[in-house]
Amino acid sequence: MRQSLVSQARRAAKPGAPAILSLPGTSLTFLLTGFTWLGISFLLGIALIIGLVYGIPLPHWLKPVHVHGALVGGILQLAIGGLLVFIARDSDRKDAHAQSRTALFLTWNGATAALLLGLWLGNMTVIGLAGLLLMASVVSLSKTAWIHFGKAAGLGAMYRIALAALLGGLATGIAMAFRLTDGFYAHARLGHIHLIVLGCLTLSFIVALHQLMPLLLRTTLGLGALTRFALWVLPAGFAVLLGAFLLSTVWLQIAVGCLLFASITLCTVQLVATWLKAGSPGTAATDHLLIGAIFLLLATATGLAMEANYLRSPPFLPIGSLHLVAYTHLAFIGFLTQVICGGLSYIVPELLTATRVHNPAKREVYHAQLDGIMNRWRAVQLTGLSFGTIALSVLASLTWTVPLGSPYVQISLWIAAALRLASLALFAAKLAWAVGLRPS
């Protein structure tokens, strides 16, 4: 991928060409804006967890604003930016990486802001209209994306499934906003959440892992028949799992959960084996991606254990809001955010090099400088993000044996918040440093 990006930039580069950041709607603009939304939502999440532990009453709209800001403004926008990078890579246009999609960028972020405003005001009409704009944005990109996914041999069909799941999830959310689901609102809400989180984000991020790792390791990822079968189990398993949720069938949820756990285990083992075979190269990108895969495995096992907990009535262990927060963030921070940080650590230097350096002889030097920035203090960054996520799980587990007001719980809270905040702040600082570094 790196050679392809650089070769395209080499053909397109002209003295005096505009820097990538001067063009609103470029893929890098999507990536940086999405990460900004994610960071703001992260701060709201810290406020929510502090309020939950200390019993501080917070506005009811803060949680949906936090969730939708992270998902829509953050993760989905980052996914769009990543998609635009790969579309540009395969494009015949000489200026593909500098191509601006201003209308898409403004519509997506305007709709996100309107969605959050509607959630704050509790105005379902504003929420529904914002959802329609988001849906229109995805539809406008769907034809190009659908064709592009067809070029991804073997795994492209899974991206198409993820795109269909996203459209289904958005459509369900719009129907909820316009009160078209009265009478089965709870089922619609389950479908809305799981179509986007499992059917779209989790599935597409797993496929992206299997595409990015070979590029980073400069090797091929041998997908044997068993691994391909394991990957194809995932969309089928997610669909059956959603049906089991809608039917409230615990035994079916556990059975499908076991199958998904086995499939994700096999995929993770394949990734680790490929990394070891390549000589265990240590970069911020590879470290984030591998740790993300392990957290996905841990999140799947935790979800399976939580389902088994309900086999007895009353459950073996009480499950409260704090436990659900810890479980979901094993996936949202442990998996999705780790993969995002890994992807950005690789893609940002590639984009900056391909669009800023006009002299072919100097590209490698500039790229090495950017790589050096993204790899600085990666041990601190990885440790903070990983152990901060684990500390949140420890915090939730403590409440089974000590009261919420216990100093052990409160110490765990501040450790989790400080570690995660420090790691994301460090990563944001490195992104700003890389973007601000001009080639000499």
Image: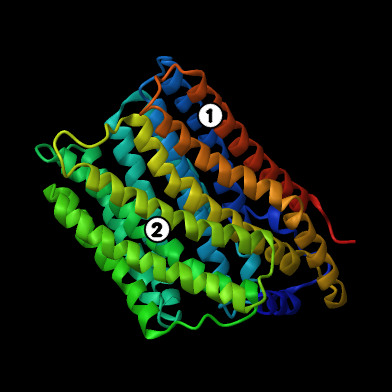
The answer to whether residue 425 is visible is yes
The answer to whether residue 101 is visible is no
Which residue is at the far left? 183
Q: Position of residue 109 (x, y in %)?
A: 49, 44
Name the residue type under label 1: Ser
Q: Is residue 425 above or below residue 50?
A: below
Other residues around mark 1 within 10 Å, as few (<14) / some (14–19) / many (≥20): some
Q: Quick one: quadrant of the C terminus?
A: bottom right
Q: Disc 2 designates what residue?
A: 202
Q: Quick one: quadrant of the N terminus?
A: bottom right
Q: Position of residue 26 (x, y in %)?
A: 60, 58
| Residue 306 horizontal side relative to residue 267, left or right | left
Q: Position of residue 241 (x, y in %)?
A: 22, 57
Q: Earlier along the polypeptide chain: callout 1 or callout 2?
A: 2
Q: Disc 1 designates what residue?
A: 412
- The quarter holding residue 226 reads bottom left
Q: Nearer the viewer, residue 77 or 190?
A: 190
- The quarter holding residue 341 reads bottom right
Measuring 78% from the left and 55% from the top, which residue is drawn there? Answer: 373
**Of helix, strand and loop, which one carries label 2?**
helix
Mark toward the viewer: 1 or 2: 1
**Of helix, strand and loop, which one carries label 1?**
helix
